[in-house]
Amino acid sequence: AQSVSQHNHHVILSEAASLELGCNYSYGGTVNLFWYVQYPGQHLQLLLKYFSGDPLVKGIKGFEAEFIKSKFSFNLRKPSVQWSDTAEYFCAVNAPRYGNNRLAFGKGNQVVVIP
Amino acid sequence: GAGVSQSPSNKVTEKGKDVELRCDPISGHTALYWYRQSLGQGLEFLIYFQGNSAPDKSGLPSDRFSAERTGGSVSTLTIQRTQQEDSAVYLCASSEERGETQYFGPGTRLLVL
C-alpha cells in the first residue's frame, strides 16, 4: 500500500526564516505528487503539484518543491516565510496509471510563523 | 467559478443515529472522492466515483458507511448507527478526470455524542 511520510509534525519559525518540509513516499511506480495547504479555518487548497517534466516545481505564494525520484522524495521549500504562511501542510501521492486514483496523505506539518 | 460545496457544515448527532452528508462537486468534474480527516488518523480515503463506473469503496471503514452519486453529480455519504469514533471532518473532492488535481470542499464536521 502507498504510504507518505512527513517528519517534524510541528514546526515553529520566525518570519523571514527559510522553510523546508520533507515528504517521502513508498510506491515504486509512476506517481503524481501534491502539496496541499490548510490555513486556519479554511479548507484544503492546492499549493503545487508534479506530474512529469521539470522536477523542480513552483507553486503559489513563493513555494517550490523538488521531486527526487531516486530518493522517493518531494520536499517543499520556501526561502523566506511570512506570518501568513502559518498553516498545516500536507503531502499527497496518487498513482492513477495503476488504477489507484485515491490520494494518500502524509500526517501533515503544522507550521507556525512567529512575527 | 463555484468550488466544491458540502452540507451541512457541522452536524451533531447522538450515538446510534444515522446521518447523511452531501457533496456538490465542481460542475463538469467526473470524478468525486470522499475523505475523512480525524486527529488520530489524519486524512483517509473513503470512496471514489468515476463517471458511470462502479465506485471504489475500498476505503470505507465498515459496512455502516455507504455512499451514492446520483446523475453523475451530487453525492451523499451515509453513516448508519453512528459511533463516537465516527467523529471527524468529512471532506469531499472532485477532479476533471482520474488522476487530475483534486479540489476539496470545506468539509462537514461531524460530532457524535
Image: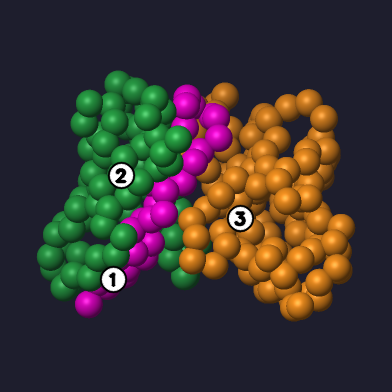
* Lateral position of residue A94 relative to residue A15, left or right: left
Q: Identify the element where label 3 is drawn.
A: strand
Q: Give the amino acid type for the residue marked by disc 2 in the picture.
A: Cys
Q: Residue at 45% of width from left, 53% of height from top?
A: B44
- Asked whether A6 or A62 is in front, the reply is A62
Q: Residue at x 61, y 64 (%)?
A: A88
- Residue B105 is a magenta residue: yes
First reached walking from the N terminus: tag 1 or tag 2: 2
Rendering colour (chain A): orange
Horizontal and vertical percent for residue B49?
A: 35, 32
Q: Does residue A28 appear in this view?
A: no
Identity of the residue drawn at 47% across and 70% down:
B39
In the picture of the structure, the residue carrying the numbered disc 3 is A37
Magenta span of residues: B84-113
In the rendered structure, which amino acid carries the disc numbered 1? Answer: Leu
Residue B93 is a magenta residue: yes
User: Distance between the Cα atoms at labels 1 and 3?
Assistant: 24 Å
Distance in Å between CA atoms under marks 1 and 2: 18 Å
Decide: is B40 above or below B68: below
Q: Are marks 2 and 3 on the same chain?
A: no
Q: Secondary structure at mark 1?
A: strand
In the drawing, what numbered circle is on residue B111? 1
Q: Chain of mark 1?
A: B
Please name which of the two marks, 1 or 3, marks the residue nearer to the observer.
3
The residue identified by callout 2 is: B23
Q: Amino acid at mark 3?
A: Val
Q: For the residues marked 2 and 3, what is the alpha-carbon distance in whole angstroms?
A: 21 Å
Query: How many residues crowd around disc 3 within 10 Å: few (fewer than 14), some, or many (20 or more)?
Result: many
Residues packed near mark 1 inside 10 Å, few (<14), some (14 to 19) or many (20 plus): some
Q: Chain of mark 3?
A: A
Chain B display color: green
